[in-house]
Amino acid sequence: MPDQNTHKVVCFGEVLWDILPSGAVPGGAPMNVAYHLQKLNKNPALITRIGIDDKGQQLMNIFSGHGVCTDFFQVDGKYQTGKVFANPNEYNEVVYDIVKPVAWDFIAWDDSLPDLVANAGYFVYGSLAARSKVSKDTLFRLLEMAKNKVLDINLRAPHYNRRIVEQLLRKADIMKMNLAELELITGWFSNYTSIEDRLKSIGDKFRLSNLVVTMGGDGALLLMNGEITKHPGFKVAVVDTVGSGDAFIAGLLSQLLDSAGNEATLEFASGLGAFIATQRGACPEYDIKKVKELIQNNVIKI
């Protein structure tokens, strides 16, 4: 039996192959977050499902090789391992075609999961895994036993609806979103225009005291326990932005686990996200020393 007591963070949801113009790379927000947390020595676990195919086995081998726990990878005999066709548009934003149904739509309940989740400091989930009934039902059962629930929202049309997103929000203790997601969600129920007012409106409506919004080259903003912290971002040469938001949330959680202050937490998360944007793909090989060097040396902020 796997040792469930050693995993400080548990991620739930999709694992897949991002099919990019340059080739196929491992992806899926929960997997990306777990990968970077492992780089930061936080020993995460990942609850997901792969197909009984070569692509699934390759994912297992790759992430086992990086030391990421794959003990909670389920294997599906009917559906294939997930794929996403990702292409950048003229604004350097990535447009996703997410294949459905695939194995991670069918993450089943397992009796090993409650202790795993209950013993973790943080449980990370998103909206994409709630697009199908089987995975959604498993997710909502696990949310009832998680200590600190981290919603990394990742809205991908047409794979979400307002009702499910609001249900996910009501379960969260911490929520991370990008600027477009902040504007979309607050547009459902408010007319606020400033980022601060939008964040506070989400916090009030869903009883959320911990919110973070990433703003690309304009940095990030953290609302934690009523206190707003801003970071202006780092000036970097962007290679691609795939996975930079996932790296950001991994950096954020690593600092929260280390009880860092709000400014240090946001700076490190921003630095890791910016560094990954300088690399090809969501899970590149890298040394964490390079991230620290970027944070220390990149004094020109934007």
Image: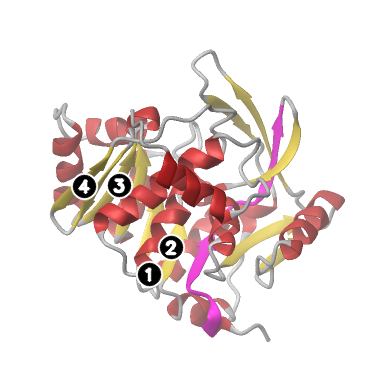
Q: Quadrant of the C terminus?
A: top left
Report helix, strand or loop for mark 4: strand
Kindly state the secondary structure of the residue where label 1 is placed. loop
What residue sits right under mark 3 in the picture? 212
**For the residue marked with disc 3, what is the amino acid?**
Val
Q: Categorize mark 3 by other alpha carbons within 10 Å: few (<14), some (14-19), many (20+).
A: many
Name the element at disc 2.
helix
**How busy is the neighbourhood of tag 2: few (under 14 within 10 Å), some, or many (20 plus)?**
many
Residue occupying image coordinates x 40% and y 67%: 143
Q: Nearer the viewer, residue 26 or 131?
A: 26
Question: Horizontally, is 112 left or right of 247 in the view?
Answer: right
Asked if labels 2 and 1 touch by Cβ distance under 8 angstroms, the answer is yes
Upstream in sequence: badge 4 or badge 1:
4
Q: Amino acid at mark 1?
A: Asp
Residue at the image position 14 percent from the left and 28 percent from the top: 191
Spatial separation of the CA atoms under disc 4 and disc 1: 18 Å
Drawn side of residue 220 relative to residue 8, left or right: left
Q: Position of residue 61 (x, y in %)?
A: 80, 60
Mark 1 → mark 2, Cα distance in angstroms: 6 Å
Q: To which residue does mark 1 refer?
A: 258
Write down the region rendered in magenta. Answer: 5-20
Q: Which mark is residue 254?
A: 2
Q: Is residue 125 visible?
A: yes
Q: Residues within 10 Å of mark 4 (few under 14, many from 20)?
A: some
Of label 4 and label 2, which has the lower sequence position?
Answer: 4
Q: Which mark is residue 229?
A: 4
Residue at 59%, 80% in the rendered image: 112
**Between marks 4 and 3 in the image, the one whose residue lies nearer the viewer:** 4
